[in-house]
Amino acid sequence: MTPLTAIWMKDFYVLRNLRRMLQRESVFKVTFISLFAVGMMGGFFAMFLSGFRFLSDMGGGGFMITHRLFALFFLGLGAMLLMSNVITSYSTIFKSRETLFLLTTPLDTRTLITYKFIESSLLSSWAFFFLMLPYTAAYAWHARLGLLFPVWTLLLAIPFVLLCGAIGTLIALTAVRWFPRSRILWAVIAGIVLVSTIYGIVQIRPVLDEDASFILNRLLPGLQLASHPLMPNNWVAEGIMALTNGQWTRGLLLWLVLLTNTAVLLLLVQWLGERTFYSAFQKEAGATDLRRRPAELLSWLDKSLVFLPHDIRGMVMKDIRSFLRDPMQWSQALIFFGLLAIYFSSFRSFHYNLMPDLWRNLIVFLNIFSVSSVICSLAARFVFPQLSLEGHSFWILGLAPTGMRRILLTKFFLSALAMVTVSAGLMGLAAWMLQAGWALTTLSVGLAIAVSLSAAALATGLGAIFIDLKQPNPVAIISGFGGTMNLVFTLGFMLSVIIPFGFIWHWHVTSGFCGLPFRQANLAATIWVVILSVTTITIPLWLGVRSLKHREY
Amino acid sequence: MITIKNLNKHFGAVQAVKDLSLSIPAGELFCFLGPNGAGKTTTIKMLTGLLRPDSGTIKIGGFDIQTQSVEAKRILGYIPDMPFLYEKLTPVEFLKFVAGLYNISRSDLNANIEATLHQFGLQEARNALIGELSHGMRQRLLYIGTFIHNPKVILIDEPLIGLDPHSIRMIKDLLRAKVREGMTILLTTHILALAQDIADRIGIISRGKLIALGKMSELQTQSGSNGTLEDIFLKLTSAA
């Protein structure tokens, strides 16, 4: 058996055992996650389908948009895939403990880098397929396409995923090999800002002519770039359509263009990996400069928090310092919120603020939904396991002359403060860029605050109830019964507070639902949100405190 | 079998290893001792090729670990202090995977695996996932995985962490038996009694520098003490 075969066999065993482990999981958890995933895909399908129908109703312009939307869709997914691959490649190639293990075996670098590249491409691509499936299904349904459409889509999507993965891996390899460790993140951020700026400049060019395609490009920024004949996303979109329409030669040509480019990039990954990976890994592993790290991080903040009681100040500073020294935590938060901030900041460049009320309303609620989703996932990922992750050092807190109530409330207030600041700021920015009006601005900021407070309380409270001090692995803590329950409640809360307002405001802009009934509906929904928020904040925290007080350690 | 020449390694301003030269012949069990932060783990990581030395050379069985790493790793086994194991594999699957990495023939593999699992008291756990095994069982599995390709050189960082007395005795007997068969073992430990018990030669490192080297009697001469290894260690490291 060759080493590469052994690795694939290992992955086969892992998959087989995952199925075995899944059978042992609670039925509630598996059912909930499956239903949620299917529900989300169904929701995306319905949304895409209604979008296609809306565009069809528009006539000629709508038809042109529909045709090009495919290319734009793959451009968006490709950009997401690329960014995701840069981060995943870095963590799977340089930060994974498996790499450390494999490096002590006689596995050659070429094999190792090929395996790690495929692993990171697979890990990054689930969201791509999760979004692509309902989109292409909606399009196939709408355009009454044949049964072979999904086959052509897969045929072109798989090399596209590998192509984006290869570019991401090349960026990660280059960054680690040639950039100092402390500056990699800044280099990535600078790269994103630079690309966004260039993209913005390209889009905001003066008007040169007024043909239909130019107007389309103004309406849907990115369309020009997405439809460029040298862009791989365009090969995918055009290839799928050509094969679906029976244009075999053109379809085959585009598929081969995509395939050969992917193959060249794969060779480049192997070539660069073979030459740079080993030395880059050793550089990364040996990069520790004790002089650079201050003995006391943020001492100025510690001094300025003198108004807090000493025990609370100690816990706050400990949590802030631990968070800042864990790049896995802050980099994920920075990427999620940073991307949203860049997206919201570009609303006026994309002329979203000039769109009709119906669309602006829709965008506001989609923004609330996206910010709330990120808040919920970050609360589940980082706030829920924080008490369990105190682990063996929990005795320090437990023996300190402070109460469990103070410990829990400190953790709640700190996480709530961080999440409220970021979510309310983002929603304020989005509403301002959309010129949304005071009522919609207040509503979106208010909902973001409610979701942040409740998500923080649920995660802190349930994290205390389901505390597991023996488990050092955060993923295992999150994926347990308590973690699932937290996710269920948080997402349930999010939907329960957003949907009523969504309906009210949708009727308001589509069916002329206004005046006193509109104001009364808003008041009723506000009371509902306040009651629900107070309940989801107080009950989990109260139960959490009770659980910590009665627990034996 | 292990040849280290003028090895140096810095982490920023801190020099973790200073001009280390050492030669360990085949069939020797060498113990590397030193206080915390002395440079033991750094040296072992450089021996495995996980860290690149600032200067100096390392040869394992005549192969340079930096320039002929694949050849060197074919004859090398490494047990780190905090080992990585695939939590979602069973012991049998893990051992077959490791055997595949070393391109070991599959003809006798199944019988060998079963016999070794039995020898290490893991036959009952053969179908369990590694994530479900106790610490001691995982350590024993790691030893089986490391010995599966019959390496000529073994590097062990803290070999007895978390093991019960039965397992400790088994590991000590196993290491001595392997050395008798001609295997070269370099291990680091803080358990001085273990070093005194099983080592052929002992090296003491302090602040990155090798301050004493030799058999027990030679260390006594070097330190000017007739006491135990503990006495010698404390005397030498506090003076350094």
Image: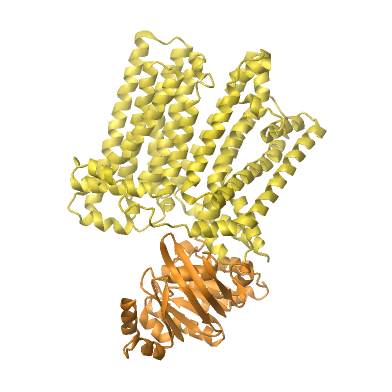
Q: Position of residue A514 (x, y in %)?
A: 40, 10
Q: Colour of chain B?
A: orange
Q: Quadrant of the C terminus of chain B?
A: bottom left
Residue that appears at 45% across and 70% down: B17
Q: Position of residue A287 (x, y in %)?
A: 47, 57
Which of the 4 image quarters holds residue A156?
top right
Q: Is residue A496 above or below residue B155?
A: above
Residue that appears at 50% across and 20% down: A348
Q: Position of residue A354 (x, y in %)?
A: 51, 15
Q: Position of A456 compared to A5: left or right? A: left
Q: Nearer the viewer, residue A511 or A321?
A: A321
Q: Is residue B166 above or below residue A422?
A: below
Which of the 4 image quarters holds residue A471?
bottom left
Q: Position of B184 compared to B203: left or right? A: right
Q: Quadrant of the N terminus of chain B?
A: bottom right
The reply to whether residue A147 is in sight is no
Q: Is residue A192 above or below residue B78?
A: above
Which chain is depicted yellow?
A: A
